[in-house]
Image (tube, rainbow, N blue to C red):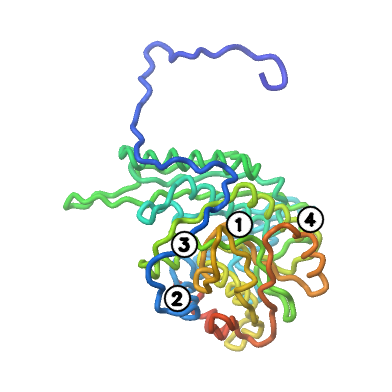
Amino acid sequence: PYRGPGAGPLPDASPPGAPPSPSAQARGAPPGTPPGTPPAPTTTSGPRPRAGVAKTLRALLAHPNIASKRWIVRQYDHEVQGNTVLKPLVGPAGDGPGDASVIQPVPGSSRALAIGCGLAIGVGDRAVGGDAYLMALAAIDEAVRNLVCAGADPHRIAILDNFCWPSCKKPENLASLVRAAEGCYDGAKAYRTPFVSGKDSLNNQFTTEDGRTIEIPPTLLITGMGLVQDVARCVTSDAKRPGSALAVVGATSHELGGSHLQRLHSDIASPVPRTDLTLGPRLARAVAALIADGLVLSAHDVSDGGLLVAVAEMLIGACAEGDEGATLGAAIDLAPAPLAGGATADDLATAFSESPSRYILEIAPEHLEEVHRRLVGLPFGVLGRTNDSGRLEVKSAGVDLAVSDLRDDFTRPLDW
């Protein structure tokens, strides 16, 4: 009994006349990955894509999954009675993608509520060797990171699930649903984020007139809610000023399976990324503490498109209105990014890997030493600095692009 004597026993058996419990077959799921298992050493095989890093960056920013959704976001009421502290779109012109929104339910209170999501469909794509278990872990990890980047306390996060699945009459589809549920269980325990609600939308498929069945991919959306202890400490993803350090927290693996880079170049053969359930929560707590203590100017999670896309989005968010609005730039190098799992230097893989549990932080020069001290023992590297050039430069990868062009790549594809 919970907090007192029990009210009475419930029978174990179904009452007389009750319909029989349904049964179904689940088949084809691979064995589970134990919680806390670090990524294994990986190799990326197949011919390297001919397109360089610069061309790939522009193609990824324009990809429908990554490109700005501002056209539709601006048509929905996200002000919530005027109490929205952080909007879905950030920066002077509202061109930057926010990691999470923050609302202040009690006007005048220092406390607020952050709301963010996590989605990692590619990690669960069976066509590239994906696993719904790993998809669930990655989705929880991303939801937590999005909330942390906005200023939420990782110790005070609750999550919800939304399962969208094809026909569970197929044993392989039901097996992947079971795998995703197992991932939800292990991920929620590791991040200490209880599921407080959820929903499902199963059997999503359509049969055409000629008898073909079109199924949606197994999809798990995680929505997270996190308590912001001090709304004045909230940060956004848009870069703030020249002269700041841009640093990555978290290790980059070269597991490219299910990534958008692999979608562009299908000849890349690689496993899907795995979430380290020991390191991921540690990184979330460490980054949250830096933000809470005012040591971070801006923060952005590394997700769809990878590290270089995240940096580009931060600079795009810094743009002001008009053609001359892109004045903030950055000069970075990919070599300082910590690598995981025996990965070797590879600019293309480092730039666009979508391995989980990573953050890009903008740090003022006077705070960099303190941030270094606090992150001792954790994967951390300073990529470079922001400047007033209006360009993104990655010397080692041959990238020198105007931020205004990157903004157009990002904002125009879905700007209907």
How crowded pointer 2 is (Cα within 10 Å; few <14, some 14-19, many 20+) is rated as many
Q: Is residue 323 left or right of residue 238?
A: left
Tell me the element at label 4.
loop
**Residue type at numbered disc 4:** Asp
Residues at marks 3 and 4, CA–CA distance in whole angstroms = 44 Å
Residues at marks 2 and 1, CA–CA distance in whole angstroms = 24 Å
Q: Which residue is mark 1?
A: 357
Which of the marked residues, 2 or 1, is nearer the chain's N terminus?
Answer: 2
Toward which corner of the image does residue 152 lie, by quadrant?
bottom right
Q: Which residue is mark 2?
A: 59
Which of the marked residues, 2 or 4, is nearer the chain's N terminus?
Answer: 2
Residues at circles 2 and 4 in contact by the CB criterion of under 8 Å? no
Tell me the element at label 1.
loop
How crowded pointer 1 is (Cα within 10 Å; few <14, some 14-19, many 20+) is rated as many
The quarter of the rendered structure image containing the N terminus is top right
Residue mark closest to the camera, 3 vs 1: 3
Q: Which residue is mark 4?
A: 230
Tell me the element at label 3.
loop
Residue mark closest to the camera, 3 vs 4: 3
**Residue type at numbered disc 1:** Ser
Residues at marks 3 and 1, CA–CA distance in whole angstroms = 20 Å
Q: Which residue is mark 3?
A: 43
**Residue type at numbered disc 2:** Ala
- Labelled disc at residue 86: none
**Residue at the image position 56 percent from the left and 54 percent from the top:** 117
